[in-house]
Amino acid sequence: MSDDAADVQRVLSGDVDAYAKLVDRYYDRCARFAIRMLGNRDDAEDALQSTFLRAYRALGRYQERDRFSAWLYRILVNQCRSIAARRSHRERVFVREEALLLNAPDKTPAWSGEDEELVQRVLNELDPLLREAFLLKYVEELSYEEMAALTGAGVSALKMRVKRACDKLRERWERIRDD
Amino acid sequence: MTDRELDPYVEWIAREAKRAVAIDPMAVERVMARIRLEPLPRTHSPRWRWILQPRALPISPLVGAALAAGLVGIGILLGHFQIDRGGQSSTGGPTAFAVQQPPLAHDTLIKFVLVAPHAATVSVVGDFNNWDAQATPMTRTPTGGTWSVAIPLRAGRHVYAFVVNGANGTTQWVADPTAPLAPEDGLGAPNSVVLVGGSAS
Amino acid sequence: MTLVRSRTPRVVLRAAALLTAAMHPLALRAQDPDPLARLDPNTRFAVEVIMDSARVAGVPMRPLMLKALEGSAKHADNRHIIAAVRSVFHAELDVRVALGSALNESEWAAAGSALQSGVPLEALAKFRAERAGKPLTRALVVLTDLIQRGVPMPEASSAIMQLWQRGAGDGDFYGLWKNVEQDILSGQNPGTALEQRMREIPARVTPGTKIPPASQEPNNSSS
């Protein structure tokens, strides 16, 4: 039995604190997706809180032969979509944390610490479905089949979205760089 | 589309996006604080049971007998056939009726009829039997070409179709040609709509 | 509410369901206590997540479950099942925007179907403005059907709304539908068929007045 399945069993037997282990195991990774997807921390934290809450409520239905991470991710993707849809069209403000200032990569051109904000801004400009597909493919590194199971979209539709996302990112990036 | 070499800029974006984000160390604890307010998760949620149990729908009554003509599927081959109506028989074009039983919790007995002389078995499937193709088999009438079944339905809108199994092992989902159509939904086979009145007219 | 700490054997659950069903005189057969068990686990989970979203959003959950069961019965691809369930959910959200939530289950489903067949939100919302205690279901079922049969959406929408505003009863909607359907089946152009049949329906009341129920129609209680 995997660690995840063992912890799920413990929770179902009444040990709530066993859930903290699951949250801990997946929080960072989920947070990364939520922040990249939603573009701001407040929304991301809402999505995360919501995701882990729903997963908790639905724990009785998790079956060991499912991959726990896929199961959790499905909830996360759904939550991010709901939150994105609910928010009005307002400027998405990316709050840069001091802790996120990155070292310049060792590759030319030299990038400044504003990189992450830049990357996020570029990502934010993608249509949500394209952004989601890009993140799932190149950040979460899922296969197209896994992405299909997660999102309910077909593999060809997802490949198309990823391709369009890459095209748009490249165009956008070139415009920013040249400014 | 194969996984081609990513454009270096796009690859850079992906790499940056992959970096860990700084997490508030209290975030997990906040989640757990919220979790602890919840009841323990169950293995079988009672709320699904609530959905499954039949309950009376508050429906405004619709025109009963006149609408009953739309309640019966006349079927693949249109034609004349006889239907007994409380002892009387009527021939002619597709007619139909709803046999009004003494009302039991708003249910009305609705008769579904399908003319399908070459079928081996036929059943009616819909939201009233949880789309279980085995739940409501239809009976072939003595004349051989017509299949029918009468089932009690709650007042309101119901969606259904007929499942026709041929002697050669084929299965066909058939909408009721004399009933309104439900919209296309990507599940392949079309459905029909029946509206059941709330009281005898 | 007792908390189930261990998995209740399915045998016990089914026996309980059978007993309950036997006591209900109109049970067609034993109600399956867990119909979603027919779905494969991934699909089931995706469907339940959508259902949970519906619960949180305050829109009907049962139609979502039924759509999943329908997909399973039709041996549809799992992705199509999930997409169909999601589509119903989104339609329900839009129904609420257009019509509010003071709807019975049938009206909700009929309105959702109308949206799914292509009726725009604004057109649906007009029914709300003119509601005045009239039941929506029949009008929307007929509208959805006409569009499915090839009547152009704007014409169908306009015709049904006209009838609605004129105070047409369920019998009128049904009669119109039956006639147009027959005409289409005999080869007539759907839009033309509707147009011609619309002319045959007498105006009952002046548009804009409150419509009392006609004496030959059953009492339409508002829901």
Image (cartoon, coloured by chain):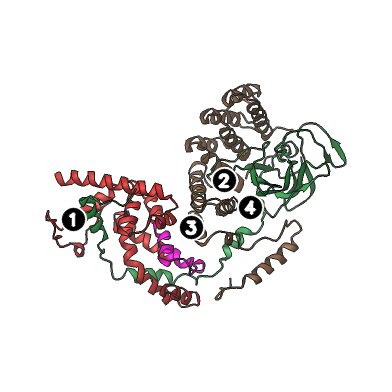
Chain colours: A red, B green, C brown
Q: Are marks 1 and 3 on the same chain?
A: no
* Front residue of C75 and C143: C75
**Is C111 placed left or right of B194 in the picture?**
left
- As drawn, the label of residue B131 is 4
**Chain bearing mark 4:** B
Gap in angstroms between the C-alphas marked 4 and 2: 20 Å
**Quarter of the figure with residue B178:** top right
Quadrant of the image containing the C terminus of chain C: top right
Real-space CA distance between mark 1 and mark 4, rounded to the nearest whole angstrom: 54 Å
- In the image, residue A70 lies in the stretch drawn in magenta: yes
Residue C46 marker: 3
For the record, the magenta segment spans A53-77
Discs 1, 4: same chain = no
Residues at marks 2 and 3, common chain? yes
**Residue C108 disc label:** 2
User: Image check: B90 left or right of C22?
Assistant: right
Look at label 2 and name its amino acid: Trp
Q: Are marks 1 and 2 on the same chain?
A: no
Task: Count residues near mark 1 (Cα–Cα under 10 Å), then give few for <14, some for 14-19, many for 20+.
Answer: some
Q: Which mark is residue A115?
A: 1
Give residue B174's position: percent from left, percent from top.
Answer: 65, 42
